[in-house]
Image (cartoon, helix red, strand yellow):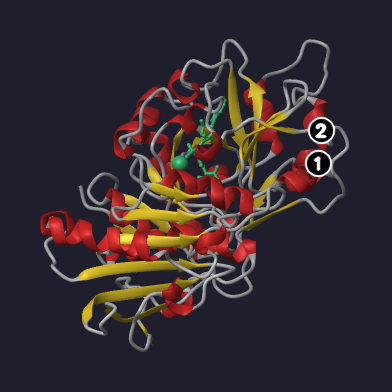
Amino acid sequence: METRIVRVAPSKGQLLGRFDSSDGASKLEEWHISPDAGEAITVLRDTAKYLRTSDTPVAFPTETVYGLGADATRSGAVKGIYSAKGRPSDNPLIIHISDLHMLRELLGRQKDDQDAIPSKYNVLIERFWPGPLTILLPNPQPSKLAPEVTAGLETFGARMPSSPLALSLIKLAGVPLAAPSANASTKPSPTAAQHVKDDLDGRIEIILDGGPCQVGVESTVVDGLCEPPVVLRPGGISLEELRSCPGWENVAKAYKDQSEEGKSAPRAPGMKYKHYSPKARVVLYESTYKAGAEGVLASDFDTASATLNGDAEKTNGHSARRIGIIRTQRWKSGAGLQCGPLQPAPINQDNHDEEYLNPAYSVYKGDLKNGQGQVIGELFDIDLGQDAKRIAQGLFSALRELDRRNIDTIFVDGIENELDIAAAVMNRLRKAASEIRS
Ligand code: TXA
Ligand code: MG
């Protein structure tokens, strides 16, 4: 099947839709499509119709990462997601809704006329929706959701994305969309339409292109049905933000990072699989690892070179050493490796204009040298900057950018802060890493 990237860009000054402007959570009751939003709405309307009838999922942008969406009420459509991604079917999917009305329809009428949405979540919904937060809710029996969505669990995860394009697509489809990240299973999540094409070319027909994602890591998944409430996956909303909400002061961390994984089973089913991995070997330096504060250790560089000398086949057939650096808060340009002057290397993407790509970083490259000053390969250097939000925005894209350049080993400078989005960045990096220096 042919895979098309379809750009959806409302003309300047046009809005795809809006919520009512009244105060409080009730403002999220209904997402209204703007009647005058023109061509973009026509594309979304056609895609929404496709979603209602086809068993092939559609990739669409959200503010976190690109999702691979399907009608959550039809088994055939949901199965299409698992097969396009190559995802294990015991890993449940997040349900995306356009407004609270759609969520209440899903939860069903309560006997005593109580709100079907547990009151514990009101404060989170008011503060963080639409946005990068997924909440667990009881799945009613009988349920409108296809059983494949929940992978046999009694709960389902729901999220109202903030991307107007996503909200409008869901609204026009008229059904909630089940959507995992639109990467091939085990790969880094996609934050641009081209990333989806790189992974799923020939497996889906439509990739809606709304430009690069603003958050860059997936939503935070919380369970407020237990006491104390827990975070099952760190993401776009931080622990600090959650703890500032009444009733959520004692929210606990229920996910384990690789460095602290013990006997206990992971609670979010998705957390037990290999994840976020580029083709290249990733060596992560924790921010607490003092020996790596100045840059890459000589011994790690030697290992990277030795791997290559031993087996050129494993390095995509090329014989020069290709090293990637992802810098954050500590490392200087080149991360302490011997190299020639670094020059800008244009971002490696097809058929897109500048304005639409706008990645959160630039790539530099230069000759990689050995101790005697001989050129032995190429070094690619990506600086994600100091700011944790910006690092999150560029992280997956940077891993993919280095993969497209056939890098053998990527060295990454880790950051630290349990309370902000750095927690999500490190959680993904620890899963992506083949080796961690801590
Ligand atoms: O930002 C996001 O959340 C993106 C965009 C597309 O919205 N979606 C996403 O979906 O990351 P996915 O399928 O890649 O990750 C879903 C996560 C997994 O860790 C899964 O185990 C967990 O949410 N999850 C979903 N439903 C659950 C449930 N009922 N109980 C526990 N964990 C659940
Ligand atoms: Mg995913």
Rendered location of residue 5, percent (x, y): 34, 60
Whether residue 429 is visible, yes or no, is: yes
Residue where numbered disc 1 is placed: 243
Q: Residues within 10 Å of mark 2 (few under 14, many from 20)?
A: some
Q: Residue at x 63, y 62 (%)?
A: 388
> Residue placed at 76% from the left, 40% from the top?
125
Image mark for residue 250: 2
Amino acid at circle 1: Arg
Viewer can see residue 408: no
Q: Is residue 15 above or below residue 272?
A: below
Question: Which residue occupies the foreground of this view, 207 or 418?
Answer: 418
255 with respect to 303 (left or right): right
In the foreground, 185 or 370: 370
Q: Is 228 displayed left or right of 287 in the figure?
A: right
- Of labels 1 and 2, earlier in sequence is 1
Q: Callout 2, which amino acid? A: Asn
Q: Are marks 1 and 2 in contact (CB under 8 Å)?
A: yes
